Image (spheres, rainbow, N blue to C red):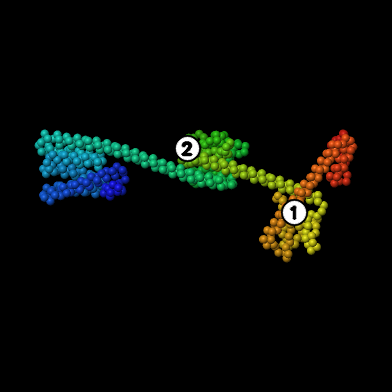
């Protein structure tokens, strides 16, 4: 509340930025305002009574008013100098001409002391020296040298005290100003560092989100290096992945024209080599080259001549290093411990995504192999099934009703015939041909219905085939079981051979079976 009341009267100009100058300006404004209010009535009455004598007294309030006005401007030191020097001069002149008694030296001390509060060191010394010198000259001229001790010694002593005080004050204020500047600089650096950390964390989080969304390896790696360069303003970024033999770290993504050329070259570095990349894979920990001009690990690349510092981080999972994230800057000492923490987290996220995509690709390959195997088995099974069938290969409807088809031939189809494949596990086992009336193509709704019919027909055929196959296998197993049981009870070789021949012919559906013993045989006989 007090500050709100006093600020309109003593607050310095906004153009005065220095804390020391603002403090002096506020003191000058407060002192001159109080002195003006005190001096004005005390000098106005003598002036009205005796204008010749009182005109000297009016100089005080006028001087204080000028000092107060200047204290509120960008030049408070000028106002302080005017107040101090004019007051010292008025008092000395008044004593010299006899308007005031010579013991006015007591009053001279006041502006000198005030100078220590509102003026810098040099103007304060000038005021103190001028006051002491002036009073000494006045007393010498008055012919009273015996009385010089008080008028000269006291101002001189006070001048020395004022000078020392001003010096100590300037020194302390200078130290305070320096400390304030250091604190402001440190605070500004902390704010910048916090802002940079916050920006880096947000950028890392955004890159991590993009990484988590990627489903393709090349897109994942390319997006990652581009986002790192764009968000962190680095010179270059690239990603190496270790091959299956763990002999080479192969470049898979790189930024800029240099990156394009390196990818075209199929750039790679040996695992365990003296390069930054080779050492990261071997150590499974980050490696930083703070100054590429002096660092022994860094190997300069002619396509990246501006690299001054490099940071490489392992893409590691629980038990292995999958690759390396390499970041380069045009500034020396561009990377610190905080950068390792941030970008290692990013590298770990990238490693998880790389492993996830690899597992997904392997799963897809396994599923494709299983699908191909299923298709192959389905095709072979239906080929065998078709060969065993002696009846019709299909049926068709016509004016005479349903007729069997013994030979499948695509020729002679009616115009507009819609052929729908009968598919089982990706393998086509037949075709459902539908010829609409009038040769018109069926509408989409009818076509969807026919496709559903074809799907169910294919499944029904497959179920029938599997049923027949299961029944046939069951019959064969029953015959084998019965034959095994009978053979175990027989002790006559001839009876055993006769039984095997009969049962084998029955199972194979042949009219004749032949079984005999060969005691001595060669390959021709077996053939």
Q: Which residue is mark 1?
A: 430
Asked whether residue 259 is in view, the answer is no
Q: Which mark, by number, is residue 498?
A: none
Residue found at x 71% / y 47%: 374
Q: Position of residue 258 (x, y in %)?
A: 53, 44
Q: Is residue 408 above or below residue 113?
A: below
Q: Residue furthest left?
A: 143
**Percent position (x, y) of residue 240?**
56, 40
Label 2 SS: helix
- Earlier-in-chain disc, 2 versus 1: 2
Q: Is residue 190 left or right of residue 158?
A: right
**Coordinates of residue 460 in the picture (x, y in percent):** 74, 53
Cα–Cα gap, marks 2 and 1: 68 Å
Which residue in the protein does label 2 denote?
A: 337
Query: How many numbered dots are placed on residues in this image?
Result: 2
Q: Nearer the viewer, mark 2 or mark 1?
A: 1
Label 2 neighbourhood size at 10 Å, few (<14), some (14-19), many (20+)?
few
Q: Is residue 370 visible?
A: yes
Report whether 85 appears left or right of 332: left
At horizontal 41% and vertical 41% (from top left) the residue drawn is 190
In the rendered image, the quadrant that contains the C terminus is top right
The spot of residue 511 in percent (x, y) is 88, 46
508 or 356, which is in the foreground?
508
> Residue lying furthest bottom in this view?
438
Q: Residues within 10 Å of mark 1 (few under 14, many from 20)?
A: some
Under tag 1, what secondary structure? strand
């Amino acid at each position: 509340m007090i500050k709100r009341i006093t600020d309109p009267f003593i607050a310095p100009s906004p153009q005065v930025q220095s804390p020391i100058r603002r403090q002096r300006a506020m003191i000058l404004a407060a002192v001159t305002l109080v002195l003006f209010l005190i001096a004005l009535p005390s000098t106005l009455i003598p002036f009205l009574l005796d204008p010749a004598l009182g005109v000297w007294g009016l100089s005080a309030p006028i001087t204080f008013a000028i000092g107060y006005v200047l204290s509120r401007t960008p030049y408070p030191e000028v106002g302080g100098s005017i107040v101090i020097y004019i007051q010292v001069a008025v008092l000395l002149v008044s004593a010299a001409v006899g308007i005031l008694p010579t013991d006015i030296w007591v009053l001279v001390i006041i502006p000198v002391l005030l100078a220590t509060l509102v003026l810098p060191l040099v103007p304060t010394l000038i005021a103190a020296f001028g006051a002491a010198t002036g009073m000494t000259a006045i007393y010498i001229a008055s012919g009273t040298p015996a009385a010089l001790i008080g008028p000269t010694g006291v101002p001189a002593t006070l001048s020395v005290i004022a000078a020392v005080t001003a010096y100590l004050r300037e020194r302390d204020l200078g130290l305070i100003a320096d400390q304030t500047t250091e604190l402001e600089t440190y605070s500004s650096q902390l704010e910048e560092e916090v802002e940079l950390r916050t920006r880096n964390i947000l950028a890392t989080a955004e890159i991590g989100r993009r990484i988590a969304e990627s489903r393709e390896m090349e897109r994942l790696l390319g997006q990652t290096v581009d986002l790192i360069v764009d968000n962190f303003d680095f010179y270059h970024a690239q990603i190496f992945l270790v091959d299956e033999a763990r002999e080479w770290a192969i470049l898979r993504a790189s930024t800029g024209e240099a990156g394009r050329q390196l990818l075209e070259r199929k750039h790679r570095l040996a695992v365990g080599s003296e390069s930054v990349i080779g050492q990261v894979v071997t150590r499974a920990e980050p490696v930083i080259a703070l100054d590429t001009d002096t660092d022994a690990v860094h190997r300069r690349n002619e396509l990246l001549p501006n690299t001054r510092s490099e940071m490489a981080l392992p893409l590691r999972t629980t038990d292995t290093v999958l690759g390396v994230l390499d970041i380069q800057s045009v500034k020396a000492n561009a990377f610190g411990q905080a950068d390792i923490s941030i970008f290692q987290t990013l590298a770990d996220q990238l490693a998880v995504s790389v492993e996830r995509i690899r597992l997904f690709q392997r799963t897809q390959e396994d599923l494709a192999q299983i699908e191909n195997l299923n298709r192959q088995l389905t095709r072979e099974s239906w080929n065998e099934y078709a060969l065993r069938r002696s009846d019709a290969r299909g049926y068709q409807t016509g004016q005479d009703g349903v007729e069997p088809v013994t030979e499948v031939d695509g020729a002679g189809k009616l115009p507009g015939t819609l052929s729908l494949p009968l598919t089982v596990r990706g393998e086509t086992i037949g075709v459902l041909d539908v010829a609409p009336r009038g040769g018109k193509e069926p509408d989409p709704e009818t076509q969807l219905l026919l496709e559903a019919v074809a799907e169910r027909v294919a499944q029904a055929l497959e179920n029938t085939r599997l049923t027949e196959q299961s029944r046939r296998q069951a019959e064969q197993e029953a015959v084998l079981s019965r034959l095994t049981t009978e053979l175990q009870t027989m002790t006559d070789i001839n009876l055993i051979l006769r039984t095997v021949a009969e049962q084998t012919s029955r199972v194979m559906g042949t009219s004749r079976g032949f079984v005999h013993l060969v005691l001595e045989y060669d390959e021709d006989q077996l053939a």
